[in-house]
Image (cartoon, helix red, strand yellow):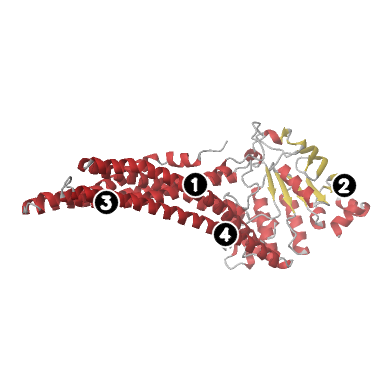
Amino acid sequence: MRPNVLGRAIRGQWRLVTISSVLYAGHQGTEALVPVLIGVVIDDAVATGSGGALLRWIGVLAAVFLVLSMCFRFGARTGERASYQAGHALRLQLTERVLDHRGGAEANRLSGALVNIATDDAKRVGAVNLALPIGIAALSGLVVGGVVLLSMSLTLGLLVLLGIPLLLWAAHLLGKPLERRSHAEQERAAHASGVATDLVGGLRVLKGIGAAPAAIARYRRTSQNSLAATLRAARAEAWHDGAMLVLTGLVVAVIALVGGRLAAQGEISVGNLVAAVGLAQFLLGPLTIFAWVNGQLAQGRASAARIASVLAAPYSVPPGTAALPESVAGRLRLHAVSHAALRQVDVDVAPGELIGVVSTDPGAATALLECLGRETDPATGSLSLDGVPLDTLNPDELRTAVLVAAHDADLFEESLIDNVRAGRDGDVRPALSAAAADEVAETLPDGVRTVLAERGRSLSGGQRQRAALARALAANPPVLVVHDPTTAVDAMTEARIAAGIRATRDGRTTVLVTTSPALLAVTDRVVLLDGGAISAEGEHADLVHGNERYRTTVLA
């Protein structure tokens, strides 16, 4: 069941929305009184030639203008605050859901699309908290104007008070196409943003393999689809606003014509006629506001539906209730695990063991990493840590004991030392040295204090790998799973890193998923996955000499 995002966004800011509505209503109500007071001035001062009455009513007008000015200023300030706070709260909810260890929110969504939802869609939903007070204020202005006209003439008053519901109903009908087009527009824009983000992130790789023209052509098609959706939404908005303008213009014209006829027949005074014409012109403002508010609500509903689809996305793995021992020894046990490319995998990793895993199929390696990090649960079989089944643990608790360092780990726009520390205290120099990241620091202008570019793009591929590996080693978890940490470094550096991992992880369980001979040479034993199933197991040197499949995979 999807959450009511729009309703929660409004209820969360109900105090500010209420205050803003009252202040905005005060502004519109007093503004509606201005033409009425002008009519009174004509009847009470101008027609009678009374200077005292004229000064008195001018003073009343000045007070009314002061009130409406202050109401507008503080109503706008309060409404904007509610809008921004609601949008910020939604961004926090979306961030919390996307970062939830149980996963699932990112399924079938590009990262750029999620960013678009957390920015544009959250802003549009938050803006409803400003649109509502303005809409309530417009309704207040219409009611005040209608009541005043009713006091002048039953015909004029009924014309306004009965015409407003019909106009609101028409606005609702006119907003339906805009809501549909707005939803499609945001979907296409989010997809284009996601494609652009992926394109920029992998630009170096795309150029290296000569695939940049194809990627650019893909983005061009996506961008053109987004443009077409935007134009359709813009046309729908133009038709909506134009139709509302015609309807409101007709209502105002009818009020002015009826008022003029009543004055000509002597049923209302000259001052009342001036007030009626002024009110008719004033009513054009609230009626126009309704068109804008209706458009904002239509866009807000469309964006709320997109946000709800992320917040209500099913989790990749269910939560667990079991707890790990206070001191995790690090015994990993995989029993008959089958998932994606994995086939009936049985592995028992002793506490403190450094084990290598070589896979002839990259898909099997990825599936193994997903299961060990509990990004997903295996289709069949079981995994356990110190005898506790992984599927009975909450992913956040599991990850305090098991760290899976992915091959494509990102760096942040912070200093090198802050990236390695990752918010933790302690001496990280051993980790820097073990990952040969100290050599990276020596090449940077400010050493370890050098601030890296976004995603570490100011570093080479090998330098990024060493910094990411240092971060994983500095975390020093009971169980560390590392995936291909040295594919972009030279052989000499790779040998140093292998020795560093061996020394730093001594007594801690470590799983190296790699085909690097240098890394495999320092392991206690190696497991070969061929076609997703275990086909051989033993020391690296023995497998190199005795297993052709292993030799081909590792030394090719």
Residue 349 seen by the camera: no
Q: Kindly check if marks 4 and 1 are in contact, taking CB atoms under 8 A apart as contact.
A: no
Marks 2, 4: nearer the viewer: 4
Q: Position of residue 343 (x, y in %)?
A: 83, 42
SS of the residue at dot 4? helix
Mark 3 to mark 1 CA distance (whole Å): 32 Å
Q: Earlier in the sequence, mark 1 or mark 2?
A: 1
Mark 1 to mark 2 CA distance (whole Å): 67 Å
Marks 4, 3: nearer the viewer: 3
Q: Is residue 354 left or right of residue 47?
A: right
Mark 4 to mark 3 CA distance (whole Å): 43 Å
Specify the quadrant of the image occupied by residue 431.
Answer: bottom right
SS of the residue at dot 2? strand
Mark 3 to mark 2 CA distance (whole Å): 97 Å
Q: Earlier in the sequence, mark 2 or mark 4?
A: 4
Neighbor class of circle 4 (other Cα within 10 Å; few <14, some 14-19, many 20+) is some
Q: Is residue 116 left or right of residue 548?
A: left
Q: Position of residue 513 (x, y in %)?
A: 77, 50
Residue ID for mark 1: 176
Q: Which mark, by number, is residue 538? A: 2
Residue ID for mark 4: 228
